[in-house]
Image: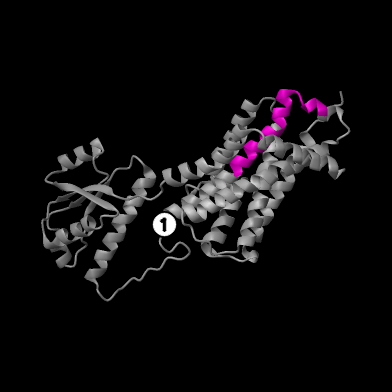
Amino acid sequence: MKWKRVVGIVKKEVKELLREPISLLTFLLVPISMMVVFGYGLKLEVKKVPFAVLDLDNSKLSREIEDKFASNREYFDLKGYLTSYDKAEKLLEKGKVSLIIVFPPNFEKRVERGEKGEFQALIDGTFPYRAEVIKSYVEAISAREALKVKPNFKVEQRYWFNESLNQDYLVAVGTMAVVLLISPAVFSALLIVKEKESGSIYNAYSSPITKGEFITGKFLSGALLSTVVFFIAYFMTVFLFGVSQKGSTLLLTLGSLIYTFVAVSFGLLISNFFSSQAAAFIGTTVLTVVPSILYSGYLTPVSSMGTSGRITAHLIPTFYYLRFLKSIFFKGDPLSLIVKDLGALTLFWVVLFLATLKTFKKREE
């Protein structure tokens, strides 16, 4: 391999990007816009739950519990008090509330007699995830009130890693993982396809350059330029979204570079099967966006998926990189605890790069 030819390809790609303002602007704005849209637009937290109360007991205990919900204004928004089940059902049907707390008659008397005191929570299950979160809120308040009946018990909670339970931090870190797959992959896919579309690829076909030198040059071009995307995503995650980093910056940079190498190699592999930029753009976007968002643990934990979902997750590099990012940002894990994820990403990179070399056909004309 003659590295002078490889370096020549890298210089050519960098110069072409710099002298095309629209391409350069698009290259920079895509990751920035994705970070902003996903980071601010995708909210996993459930707050300000609209709810109403149907109190058929009207006792001191029922009013105390009602007040616990109403006073927690960060998570609950009291819309009013009801007098019948019919009105409760109508509010749920119209979507005006997501939760209705129902206290049955003699609720307080049952508790005073030592019987099991039960009240009902009617939850709108249209959105299952939201319904499960609301259910957990109700159970937390109920458990707290139940402990007051038995004052000898005290529960002291402490959360590790994400002490404030700020879902925005998880969204920001997850968005970083998604952006660092999509943007480099799409950009790299167009590196070869644009030459096919313009016809300049025939210069490579007829020149002495080997396909190894050609692919390596394209890979290094994509990898070099994609480091800019990494720094953009990283600084936005830390300074714009305020995510604190507990782990090593050196390890973070190393793992992120390997991950961008995976994305670039995947983009180049995809480009071997397309002859137009539009098709390459759409194909690469679909093949990166859907898996990285649905199966990486970005929206839902992989452990909660079915068997097929968990298997699919382990076949996607974003799963390993997102787990790596959580270890660095939230836990501050050392190299010994993240080496498996780094190894998996390295394996993805090698396999995809070799597959690109294998599928690229250099024709002599």
Quadrant position of residue 24: top right
Q: Main secondary structure of the magenta part?
A: helix
Q: How is the image coloured?
A: one colour
Residue 314 screen position, x and y as percent: 61, 48
Q: Secondary structure at mark 1?
A: loop
Residue at the spot x=17%, y=64% of the render?
Answer: 111
Answer with left or right where residue 52 lies relative to residue 339: left
Residue 284 screen position, x and y as percent: 62, 34
Q: Quadrant of the N terminus?
A: top right
Based on the picture, tell me whether residue 187 belongs to the magenta stretch: yes
Residue 43 screen position, x and y as percent: 41, 47
**Magenta span of residues:** 181-203
Crowd class of label 1 (few under 14; some 14 to 19; many from 20; radius 10 Å): few
Residue at the spot x=82%, y=27% of the render?
Answer: 203
Q: Residue furthest bottom?
A: 152
Answer with left or right where residue 344 lies relative to residue 145: right
